[in-house]
């Protein structure tokens, strides 16, 4: 390929992205960052576009990994990518491919008419927030200090796959059991919610990188010990950890935009979803 005379016409980086985590948890084998914590981003190739429009291929994560490596070659280990960086990269790929035009179809909350409106990804990136050290610390009383991090790509895929499986199971039960009574449906739904809650709990525990006992000057990093501690603390403390981890995962590009219905002029705040199936897909 190095001798290919067409090489000068290959894709070139369309922009350079500053990552919301500033590379805090990466080493050089994960992501190669510039001194400004940036990575070059290329537009989608024709093959990338095909893969992003094959939802089944995206579900196991391998197709999405390949696309990210092709569009952001400085990312060496996609599984280690933090969610705020991942979603920022999605926006960068959108901009590099089609100038960042993102069309959304929603039902107007005011008149229930289907409405199409366009979002400019440049505007979302311009209002990116960045993780600060204080965002990654949780302190209980004067002795426990937790260091947390966002979900990784691998953790995100685990949750998405499990959520998809649960949705498929519930849909199949509903279709095959038209006469099932409401109590049985409630039981099945409760079991499904419990399984998803267990996955959420597992992800939160994996987001706790360490717990420091200040008085004893002990640093706990063993995941088994952290999980054991997590299941034995008061609900109020567990809720604080879950809320803080969730908040950390929302750092990055702007996720809320103003929307207006062109039929009734109703306005509302639209929350954006950067899930690649809906964000890049044509169907």
Image: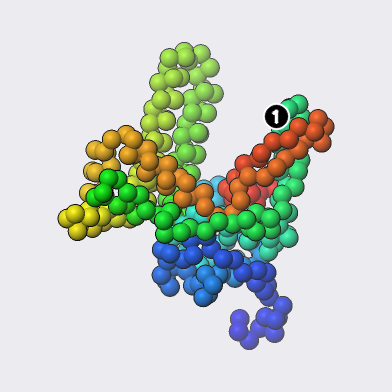
- Regarding residue 171, the answer to whether it shows in the image is yes
| Horizontal side of residue 49 vs 135, given as left or right | right
Picture quadrant of residue 183: top left
Residue at figure coordinates x 34%, y 55% from the top left: 147
Is 221 displayed left or right of 273 in the figure? left
Vertical order, 117 against 126 (above or below):
above
Residue at 42 percent of width and 30 percent of height: 193
Q: Position of residue 113 (x, y in %)?
A: 76, 29
Task: Check disc 1 and report its element: helix, strand or loop.
Answer: loop
State the residue position of label 1.
Answer: 109
Q: Is residue 61 above or below residue 196?
A: below
At x 65% / y 63%, what residue is drawn? 44
Q: Position of residue 138 (x, y in %)?
A: 35, 49
Farthest residue toward the left?
216
Q: Residue furthest bottom?
A: 3
Near mark 1 (Cα within 10 A), the count class, few <14, some 14-19 or many ≥20, is: few
In the rendered image, the quadrant that contains the N terminus is: bottom right
In the image, residue 90 lies at what x, y percent?
60, 57
> In this orientation, which residue lies closer to the viewer: 266 or 33?
266
Q: Quadrant of the C terminus?
A: top right
Q: Give percent across and percent down for residue 221.
A: 26, 56
Q: Is residue 53 visible?
A: no
Q: Which quadrant holds residue 48?
A: bottom right
- Describe residue 119's horizontal placement relative to residue 27 as left or right: right
Question: Does residue 17 appear to the left or right of 135 in the view shown?
Answer: right
Q: Is residue 68 above or below residue 141?
A: below
Q: Residue at x 32, y 52 (%)?
A: 146
């Amino acid at each position: 390929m190095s001798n290919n005379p067409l090489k000068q016409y290959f894709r070139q980086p369309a922009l350079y992205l500053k990552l919301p985590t500033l590379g805090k948890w990466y080493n050089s084998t994960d992501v190669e960052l510039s001194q400004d914590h940036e990575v070059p981003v290329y537009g989608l190739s024709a093959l990338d576009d095909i893969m992003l429009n094959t939802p089944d291929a995206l579900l196991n994560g391998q197709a999405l990994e390949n696309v990210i490596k092709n569009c952001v070659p400085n990312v060496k280990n996609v599984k280690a990518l933090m969610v705020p960086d991942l979603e920022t990269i999605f926006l960068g790929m959108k901009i590099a491919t089609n100038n960042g035009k993102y069309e959304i179809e929603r039902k107007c909350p005011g008149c229930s008419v289907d409405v199409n409106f366009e979002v400019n990804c440049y505007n979302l990136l311009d209002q990116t927030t960045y993780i600060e050290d204080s965002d990654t610390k949780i302190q209980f009383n004067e002795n426990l200090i937790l260091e947390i991090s966002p979900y990784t790509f691998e953790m995100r895929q685990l949750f998405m796959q499990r959520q998809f499986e649960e949705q498929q199971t519930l849909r199949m039960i509903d279709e095959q059991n038209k006469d099932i009574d409401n109590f049985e449906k409630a039981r099945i739904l409760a079991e499904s919610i419990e399984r998803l809650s267990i996955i959420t709990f597992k992800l939160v525990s994996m987001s706790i990188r360490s717990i420091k006992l200040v008085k004893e000057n002990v640093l706990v990093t063993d995941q088994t010990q952290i999980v054991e501690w997590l299941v034995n603390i008061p609900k109020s403390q567990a809720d604080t950890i879950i809320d803080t981890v969730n908040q950390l995962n929302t750092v990055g590009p702007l996720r809320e935009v103003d929307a207006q219905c062109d039929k009734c002029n109703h306005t509302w705040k639209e929350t954006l979803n950067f899930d690649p199936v809906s964000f890049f897909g044509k169907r």
